[in-house]
Image: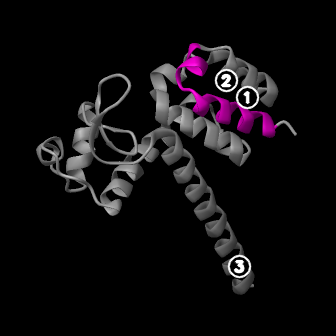
Amino acid sequence: MPDNQDSYAFARQRARDKFNQELYEQIALHEGIETSVYKDTKGKRTIGIGFNLDEPSNRKKAEAVGLDIQDMLSGRTLSDKEIKMLYNESIKQAANDANAFLPRAGKQPPVVQKVLIDMAFNLGLTKLNKFKNMRAALLEGDYNKAADEMVNSKWYGQVGNRSKRLVKMMRSAAQ
């Protein structure tokens, strides 16, 4: 039986890898990828895939992976590997925030997990927690109602195509 267990473990790992790659591509599409510092729509100095350098906790994360904040602010460009390292730090936080927002978020369909993580990446936990009616709909397993609650928010009009894509993804879980 070890071979079957190895096969199941391999299959689970492949599914996780596929999920993570799809999530990376989705968030990169929504955030964009920038090798040097730019100001985001709120004027925050950002680099990579939506990595906010004005956030003190992010500065610590960047330094923890060996990146010098002043170098980046002075115009140093990041390699693909460095962008991915910062993304990995951000996505861990977003996944934690999604799980804090919705108990057992990891038990939701994968498409719903991607929506929640993407919204957490974009909004952070404090703003995501304002989606109380969406949370209630998710707890009831009503994905169309959750999508309706996304549409019925200020966020929906602020983030352009991102919100439209995420609503479509949420609705796909209802089918």
The reply to whether residue 99 is in sight is no
In the rendered image, which quarter is residue 57 located in? top left
Label 1 amino acid? Leu
| Residue that protrudes farthest toward the right in the picture | 175
Q: Position of residue 84 (x, y in %)?
A: 38, 56
**Residue positioned 66% across, 36% down in the render:** 165
- The tag earlier along the polypeptide, 3 or 2, is 3
Write the start and end of the magenta stretch as one range.
154-173
Q: Are marks 2 and 1 in contact (CB under 8 Å)?
A: yes
Describe residue 17's horizontal placement relative to residue 51 as left or right: right
**Residue positioned 15% across, 49% down in the render:** 68
The answer to whether residue 106 is above or below residue 150 is below
Question: Is residue 129 rendered magenta in the image?
Answer: no
Q: How far, Cα to Cα, is label 3 from label 2? A: 36 Å
Q: Mark 1 packing: few (<14 Cα in 10 Å), some, or many (20+)?
A: many
Label 3 amino acid? Ser
Circle 3 is placed at which residue position? 7
Q: Mark 2 packing: few (<14 Cα in 10 Å), some, or many (20+)?
A: many
